[in-house]
Image (tube, rainbow, N blue to C red):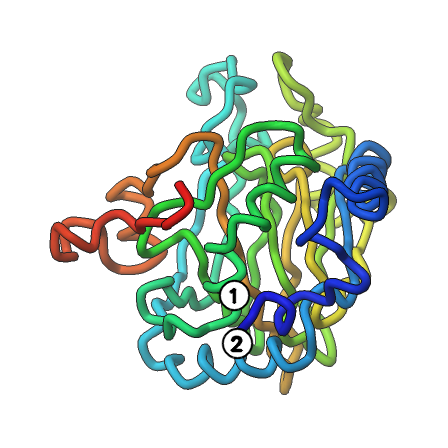
Amino acid sequence: MHIGEIIDLARYPLDDLTSTRGQELVKACRDQLDESDSCLLPGFVTEGAIARTKSDGLGKLGSAWQVDHNFAYNDVNDDTLAIPLESLPPDHPRHFKSLTRIRFLARDLQSKENPARVLHAWQGMSEFIGSVMQQSTFPSACPLSSCILTIAEEGELQDWHFDGIDYIVTIMLEKPEAGGAFEYVSGLRFPDREDDYDGVSDVFKGNRDNVVSLPVEPGTLTLFRGKYNLHRAAPVAKGSRRIMAILSFEQVPAKTGTDNYLNLFYGRSLKDLNESERVVQYDWI
């Protein structure tokens, strides 16, 4: 597919970011992030591209890796957890285990024509994300994790957690009829200081006073600062399904995932691939 068949370029001129409209788009995205640590671009991906991406993903569903893992609070890579875990009481929120139960479809299992893969590899997408985030940006070169689809069905979720990376880029492909909302709470983590553990504990115990639910519809591109905002994808209700594309970007080229990370989310690592397949090559880098 041509990029104009994937993105609504009339609404989102990523092919001309130096134009007045392109600069206005970048500024609007920055303003959203500054205000709420999230940026939603509804209708970013066309209906035709959504349908093709979903069709490809569902056709490979049997090959997707089922993750069913309880992640420790300490599993994220950050510099805020200064207090040794062993010194904390058993009911401290850092002992909380965050359940991820969802299927992950790796990049190399998708067709080369999958619109999500095409979009992720397109130079203009990296330039757009870099302009919004105001940093050097390259598509992840990992053949497994760089551009993935996640499929969540009844009862499946990604419970409350902080990310180990500054931001994530997602595209909603299928919204569940019930449940499965993306929810977050701001103001509980800041750089170079301990988390607000009382506030985090309240969320873990079910307090929803400060929970924000993002109104994400199919075709919406979302940028979200996940490292400093507690968030989750709520359980999907009976008879529903959520399908999302996750596009990964890095500040340096040719970066790939670690063996432990890849084995957990995809049941394979780079060692399981032919040597020539272990790094994705982009023709513009």
Q: Position of residue 220 (x, y in %)?
A: 72, 63
Q: Which residue is mark 1?
A: 116
Whether 186 is drawn above or below 175: the answer is above
Whether 26 is drawn above or below 197: the answer is below
Could you classify mark 2 by the number of other residues whose Cα lies within 10 Å: few (under 14), some (14-19), or many (20 or more)? many
Q: Position of residue 240 (x, y in %)?
A: 64, 82
Find out whether the residues at labels 1 and 2 contact each other: C-beta distance under 8 Å: yes
Answer left or right for 158 relative to 15: left
Query: Which picture quadrant has residue 260?
Result: top left
Residue type highlighted by circle 2: Thr
The residue depicted at 40 percent of the width and 67 percent of the height is 105
Whether 202 is drawn above or below 144: the answer is above
- From the viewer's side, name the closer residue of 153 and 109: 109
Residue type highlighted by circle 1: Ala
Q: Position of residue 137 (x, y in %)?
A: 53, 36
Residue 53, numbered label: 2
SS class, disc 1: helix
The disc, 1 or 2, on the residue closer to the chain's N-terminal end is 2
Could you classify mark 1 by the number of other residues whose Cα lies within 10 Å: few (under 14), some (14-19), or many (20 or more)? many
